[in-house]
């Protein structure tokens, strides 16, 4: 069967090698400070009331994100490595703990919005206090390798919460009948997208996973070899127009397209379109970080679950890529694209210029893969509480790759493994197709 229906046909293309990445020149302290300033910029448009909202069990209040990110630095770095450090508040150790059972008890996630105290002002004082102590630690003497690694982990941890902060406030504003905008509407980008085509990759044994030359999370390692069958990989992401064709073809009413669990989820949640889409007359609109707007057919479809992505792929005569197939393709591409620093907070249409490599690999939307979130051969979580960061979630989750329009650019890489349950839709998640090379 063809990878797409006739209007989405592929043609093969060779692959180019990536360009060299420029070396980073910032010090650890300046990286820390720039990251913290980015977080403050994200909450600047929000009122104290905005920052208290928790719109679904998966989300957290913005105020909690601000405090928890500081809690991470305080708990794992300052309390352990700064002599005579005094915690800002003794009860914050449990109040802003997320899921680290080795650290101690924590409140249930679903009720984080019930804590009106500490106030937002107190949380900001907490952040400034931690910032001052981190500066003291990093300026007092050159940090040891162990401390430097922990600080780098803390920076990347808060970058994850920057992404979650935008994702969560978007959902919070969507459930508000006023449908407020988080930001001004971004300038429209070019709407002509390149025709869909396939890039062919040969079978072979490939090295996948992170190496030890740069920061990575423990779930990206150890680097190891995998055998990959020949496959074809889509030039670009699936667009809203292509997804509308699936909907018009009764895609949400055809059980033969759906996994059993997906069909049950569809019926339970009454899905008939991606999250944030609403129909008025014959036209579809969607809620964005700048409020309601018309669905732009050339933009990547976004906020779909793994089940919807899988059903669409089956309808298109294709499949989702495995995570190692995705990494084989992405490892040859430079990290660039529509990401957090661009300030759009919404997927953009693919560039229309001809290219001999896949586009939209990084940014725009997280791409569902067909792979369950499992440990790599030889994986060992870190000793102690930090071992709970990733490893204990390796069950009932699917892997996503590539980052989204709210992922910090310095945070993403080809080996990065995101993971969510297959029903998840509030994330900026979308679709790229693949098939077996014939």
Image (cartoon, rainbow, N blue to C red):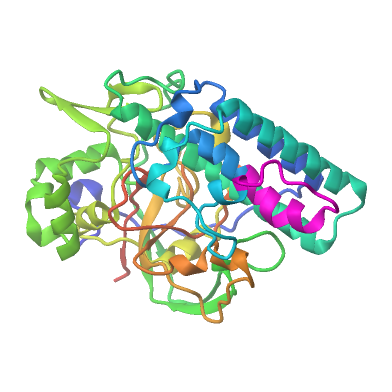
| Residue 406 shows up from this direction | no
Would you identify the image quadrant in which residue 203 lies? bottom left
Q: Point out the stretch of residues depicted in magenta.
A: 70-92
- Above or below — where is 172 with respect to 421? above
Is 76 in the magenta? yes
Which of 281/29 is in front?
Answer: 29
Image coordinates for residue 206, horizontal then vertical, percent? 52, 75
Which residue is painted at 85% across and 60% down in the image? 144
Which residue is painted at 82% across and 41% down in the image? 135
Which residue is painted at 74% across and 42% down in the image? 31
Image coordinates for residue 25, horizontal then vertical, percent? 80, 45
- Above or below — where is 309 with respect to 53? below
Is 352 on the left or on the right of 246, as rendered?
right
Is 140 in the magenta? no
Tell me the quadrant of the picture where the N terminus can be found.
bottom left
- Above or below — where is 26 with respect to 311? above
Would you identify the image quadrant in which residue 408 lies? top right
Is 100 on the left or on the right of 277, as rendered?
right
Image coordinates for residue 259, horizontal then vertical, percent? 18, 63
- Above or below — where is 2 with respect to 308? below
Is 116 on the left or on the right of 236, as rendered?
right
| Residue 373 shows up from this direction | yes
Which of 100/148 is in front?
Answer: 100
Image coordinates for residue 356, horizontal then vertical, percent? 47, 51
């Amino acid at each position: 069967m063809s990878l797409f229906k006739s209007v989405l046909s592929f043609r093969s293309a060779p692959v180019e090698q990536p360009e060299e990445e420029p070396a980073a020149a910032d010090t650890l302290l300046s990286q820390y400070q720039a990251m913290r300033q980015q977080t403050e910029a994200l909450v600047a448009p929000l009122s104290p009331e905005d920052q208290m909202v928790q719109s679904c069990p998966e989300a957290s209040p913005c105020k909690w994100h601000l405090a928890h990110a500081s809690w991470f630095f305080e708990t794992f770095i300052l309390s352990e490595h700064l002599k005579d450090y005094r915690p800002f508040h003794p009860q914050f150790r449990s109040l802003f703990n997320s899921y680290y059972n080795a650290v101690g008890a924590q409140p249930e996630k679903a009720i984080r919005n019930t804590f009106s105290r500490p106030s937002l002002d107190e949380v900001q004082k907490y952040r400034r206090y931690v910032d001052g102590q981190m500066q003291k630690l990093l300026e007092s003497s050159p940090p040891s390798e162990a401390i430097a690694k922990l600080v780098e982990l803390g920076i990347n941890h808060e970058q994850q919460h920057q992404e979650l902060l935008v994702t969560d406030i978007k959902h919070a504003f969507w459930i508000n009948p006023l449908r407020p905008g988080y930001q001004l509407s971004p300038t429209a980008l070019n709407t002509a997208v390149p025709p869909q085509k396939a890039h062919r990759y040969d079978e072979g044994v490939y090295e996948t996973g992170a190496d030890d030359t740069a920061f990575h999370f423990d779930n990206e390692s150890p680097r190891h070899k995998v055998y990959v069958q020949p496959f074809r990989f889509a030039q670009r992401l699936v667009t809203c127009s292509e997804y509308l064709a699936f909907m018009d073809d009764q895609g949400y009413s055809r059980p033969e397209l759906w996994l059993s669990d997906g069909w049950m989820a569809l019926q339970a949640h009454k899905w008939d379109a991606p999250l944030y889409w609403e129909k008025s007359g014959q036209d579809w609109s969607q809620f964005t970080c700048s409020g309601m707007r018309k669905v732009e057919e050339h933009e990547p479809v976004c906020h779909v679950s793994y089940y919807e992505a899988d059903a669409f792929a089956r309808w298109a005569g294709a499949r989702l890529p495995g995570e190692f197939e995705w990494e084989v393709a992405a490892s040859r591409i430079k990290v660039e694209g529509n990401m957090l620093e661009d300030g759009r907070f919404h997927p953009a249409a693919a560039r229309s210029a001809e290219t001999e490599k896949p586009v939209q690999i990084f940014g725009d939307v997280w791409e569902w893969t067909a792979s369950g979130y499992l440990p790599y051969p030889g994986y060992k979580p870190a000793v102690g509480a930090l071992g709970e960061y990733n490893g204990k979630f390796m069950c009932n989750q699917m892997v996503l790759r590539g980052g989204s329009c709210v992922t910090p650019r310095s945070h993403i890489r080809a080996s990065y493994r995101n993971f969510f349950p297959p029903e998840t839709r509030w994330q900026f998640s979308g679709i790229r197709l693949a098939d077996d090379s014939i």
